[in-house]
Image: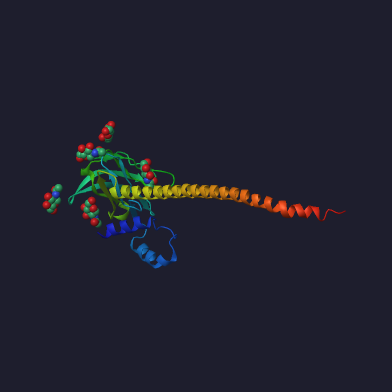
Amino acid sequence: MEVQGSGAEESRSGHRFCGTTRPWTGLIVTLLLSVWSAQGLEMSTGKVPFMEALNGSTVLLPCTYASCIGIKNLYFSWQYNDNGTMQKVCESVIPYDGMEPHPVNIFRSRVEFVGNSDPKNVNNISILIWNITFDDAGEYTCFGRNPKEKGKNHSAIFTLVVVDELRVVDNTLTIIIASAVGGAIALLMTFMLVKNFILFVLFKIEEKKKIECLVTSSAEETNNVSGSKASKPTTPKKK
Ligand SMILES: *[C@@H]1O[C@H](CO)[C@@H](O)[C@H](O)[C@H]1NC(C)=O
Ligand SMILES: *[C@@H]1O[C@H](CO)[C@@H](O)[C@H](O)[C@H]1NC(C)=O
Ligand SMILES: *[C@@H]1O[C@H](CO)[C@@H](O)[C@H](O)[C@H]1NC(C)=O
Ligand SMILES: *[C@@H]1O[C@H](CO)[C@@H](O)[C@H](O)[C@H]1NC(C)=O
Ligand SMILES: *[C@@H]1O[C@H](CO)[C@@H](O)[C@H](O)[C@H]1NC(C)=O
C-alpha cells in the first residue's frame, strides 16, 4: 500500500524527483523521499487521475513511467478493479528505455494500447477504451515492476466515471448565465431606445417650444423693435 501512496504523491506533483527542480520548501521532504525511494520507478496517471466521460465515447487512460536508474525488462500492466478483484486489462514487457513493448497482451474488449516512447523521454503506456459502457466505470491501476529494483511494485490509479449525459448543473448554469447576459443586453438596449426616444421627444418639445418662443418673441421683438429699433437707428445715424 505504501507503493500506491508514492504513486499518488508522484502524480500529484507531476514530476519525477530524480533532479533538483523542487522548491526549497519541499527540500527536506524530497531528501527523505529520495533516500527512501532513491532512483526507483515511478508510475503516473497524470495530474488529474480521474475522468468523467459520456456513455459510448472513447477515452484515453493515461499512464507514464520514469526511472532514474533505467529499466531492464520492465513489466507493466493495467488492471481493472472489479468489485475488489483485479482483472488484467493488458500487460507487456519493455526490454530497455526507449524501446516499445513488443507483444502487448490485451484481455479486455474494446481496449487498445496506444503507448509509445517518444524522444522527449515521456515513456507513455496509456490505453484507449473504445465506445465505453457503464460497465467500464471504475478504478484502473497502472502497475509497473522493474527487475533492477528486485521486484518492487509500483502503481498509480486512474478512475473512470461514466455518465449518461453531460452534467445538468453545467447546462443550467450556462443557460442562467446566457439568459442573464442576454437579459442584461436586452435591458440595456431597451433602456437606450427608451432614452433616445425620450430625448427625441424632449428635443421635439424643446424645438416646438423654441419655435413658439421664437415666434412669440420675434413677434414681441418685432413689436418692440418697431418701437425701439426704429428709434435706435434713427437717433445715432450721424456721421
Ligand atoms: C448508453 O448505454 C445504454 C445501455 O447501457 C444504451 O442503450 C444507450 O444507447 C447508450 N447511450 C449512448 C449515448 O451511447
Ligand atoms: C460487490 O461486492 C459486494 C460485497 O463485497 C457484493 O455484495 C456485491 O453484490 C458485489 N457486486 C457485484 C456487482 O459483484
Ligand atoms: C465503436 O462504435 C463504432 C460505432 O458505433 C463502431 O463503428 C466501432 O467499430 C466501435 N469500436 C469498437 C472498438 O468496438
Ligand atoms: C500518450 O500517448 C497518447 C496516444 O499517442 C497521447 O494521446 C497522450 O497524450 C500521451 N500522453 C503523454 C503524457 O504523452
Ligand atoms: C508485487 O506484486 C505481485 C503481484 O503482481 C505480488 O505477487 C508480489 O508479492 C508483490 N511484491 C511486493 C514486494 O509487494
Horizontal placement of 237 versus 105: left or right?
Answer: right
Using the image as rendered, state which of residue 228 and residue 73 is in the foreground: 228
Across the whole image, how many numbered discs are drawn on residues? 0
Considering depth in this image, is 191 or 184 the residue closer to the camera?
A: 191
Q: Which residue is pictured at 74% across the width and 53% down the height?
A: 229
Can residue 97 be seen here? The reply is no
Residue 14 location (% of width, % of height):
38, 55
Give the residue displayed 29% in from the left and 59% down from the top: 5
The x and y percentages for residue 187 are 42, 49
Position of the N terminus, as image quadrant, is bottom left
Q: How is the image coloured?
A: rainbow
Q: What residue sits 33% from the left and 63% below the top? A: 36
Q: In percent of the image, x 46 and y 48: which residue is there? A: 194
Q: Position of residue 204 (x, y in %)?
A: 54, 47
Question: Horizontal placement of 93 versus 228: left or right?
Answer: left
Quarter of the displayed picture in which ligand 3 can be seen = top left
Decide if residue 54 is on the left or right side of residue 232: left
The answer to whether one can see residue 201 in this image is yes
Given the current orientation, which residue lies at the most extreme right position?
239
Front-lying residue, 133 or 166: 166
x, y (%) of residue 176? Answer: 34, 50
